[in-house]
Image (spheres, rainbow, N blue to C red):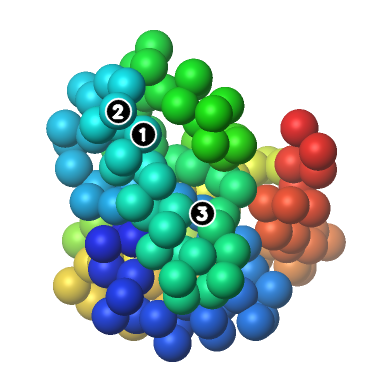
Amino acid sequence: CVAGRAKEQAGLLRRIKEEGHTLGNHSYAHSWLTNFLAGRPLRAEILRAQQMFKDILGEAPKYYRSPMGLTNPHLGPVLRETGLKLVGWDVRPFDRGIPAKTTAARINGAAVDGSIVLLHDGGADPENLSVAVSGIIGHFTALGYSFVNLDELLGDI
């Protein structure tokens, strides 16, 4: 979750948590520049997001996904210091601005047991994401798969 938008979506964040989903830190500003920060500025960007979650939910996430999935050598020490675990993805459907059926087909053809799928909720048509996710869940449920949150998938890594 991009924390800079969290304040205006506080009710949604609470609902997501109450329904048992895992929220993660995706930076405060979601800027390309985050990937080029080091030391104090990088730490401040991550901790600002952590504080926003604490203010809204009473606790901060334990997972971090960097903007655009990019990392730099300075990120590891900051994540260790803050106790965050870096999480990426292995299936990226390039879902911005494409039909829901295309998104679902790309994921259904690429995801395997244990996959982490990258999807975006900030597009121009939020219903498109809902339709795509319904198709993805239906496909994998029919194949006997189940869906788990990051805590269940990753355990104590």
Q: Are the residues tagged 2 and 1 within 8 Å (C-beta)?
A: yes
Q: Residue 132 placed where, x, y %?
A: 44, 69
Q: Dot 1: within a 10 Å radius of its alpha carbon, few (fewer than 14), some, or many (20 or more) residues?
A: some
Q: Nearer the viewer, mark 1 or mark 3?
A: 1
Badge 2 crowding class, 10 Å Cα cut-off, few under 14, some 14 to 19, many 20 or more, is: few
- The span from disc 1 to disc 3 (Cα, nearest Å) is 16 Å
Q: Residues within 10 Å of mark 3 (few under 14, many from 20)?
A: many
What residue is disc 2 on? 40
Is 75 displayed left or right of 142 in the figure? Answer: left
Circle 3 is placed at which residue position? Answer: 24
Write the residue at 74% across / 59% down: 148
Q: Give the labeled residue for mark 1.
A: 43
Residue at horizontal 24 percent and vertical 25 percent from the top: 37
The residue lying toward the viewer, choosing from 101 and 115, is: 115
Work out whether 9 lies above or below 41: below
**Mark 1 or mark 3: whose residue is earlier in sequence:** 3
